[in-house]
Amino acid sequence: MRIRRATMLVVAAVVVVIATVVSLRIAFNQPKSSVSIAAVSESPFAIRSKPPTYKDIAAQAWFEHDLTVENTSDRPIAIPYDDSISGTYLGDHQLLVMDDECGPGSPMPGKQFPSFGCTSIGHNAIQLAPHTSAKLTTIAGYSQLAGMPALDHGDYVWDKDITWRFADATELQKAHVKITYSVK
């Protein structure tokens, strides 16, 4: 009985060591990315990014990061969330980035790269009083999905549009945010 228990403990320890080595190997083989945000064009707000968090390569998303929006004006603003949901391929289809209401699909017949889709589920607009901030979205980045070429080191730039309006106005405006992913 003691020999059997000792053998089971040794086997369990070996499994844990192998799983740890595999996880570390996956983590070390995956490149890292930093995120920077350029100034928002012609808008009364600033966009900031939290540092990305990384996942094992076996997980669907390679990294995620939150974008926050800060109203820098003296007037309340509204950002109709559903009008700003988007995603795009960067590079030569090497990096897929998208808002949290989007997700990757499978390669479609006759297409080399996975499709992706975004849903509009009727979120309320984000209302920001002057000089306040709130989370805008979580962005997920994907690489190495079926059909995608290898991710090269370098900068990948997403020119993302954000629809907004002053809270007391009805006219929607677009702001352009330049999000740069530097892959090392």
Image (tube, helix red, strand yellow):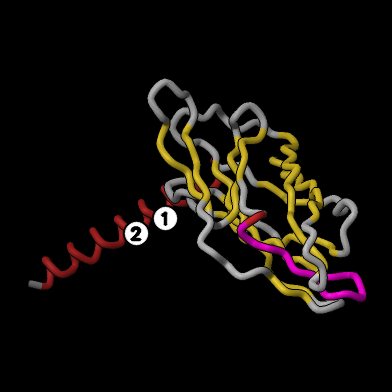
**Picture coordinates of residue 135, whole percent (x, y):** 68, 69
Q: Quadrant of residue 126?
A: bottom right
Residue 54 shown left or right of residue 12 in the figure = right
Amino acid type at circle 1 is Thr
Query: In the current view of this chain or complex, which residue is farthest to the top?
Result: 110
Helix, strand or loop at label 2? It is helix
Amino acid type at circle 2 is Val
Residue 1 shown left or right of residue 105 in the figure = left
Q: Residue at x 56, y 57 (%)?
A: 100
Q: Which residue is mark 2?
A: 16
Helix, strand or loop at label 1? It is helix
Residue 29 or 178: which is nearer the viewer? 178
- CB atoms of marks 2 and 1 within 8 Å: yes
Q: Residue at x 67, y 54 (%)?
A: 84
The crowding category of the residue bearing disc 1, from other C-alpha atoms within 10 Å (few below 14, some 14 to 19, many at least 20), is: few
Q: Quadrant of residue 128?
A: bottom right
Whether the magenta-drawn stretch holds residue 75 is answered as: yes
**Picture coordinates of residue 48, whole percent (x, y):** 78, 61
Q: Which residues are magenta?
A: 71-82
Q: Which residue is mark 1?
A: 20
Q: Residue at x 68, y 63 (%)?
A: 80
Quarter of the image where the N terminus is located: bottom left
Residue 41 shown left or right of residue 103 in the figure = right
Residue 102 or 125: which is nearer the viewer? 125
Whether the magenta-drawn stretch holds residue 8 is answered as: no
Q: Is residue 25 visible?
A: no
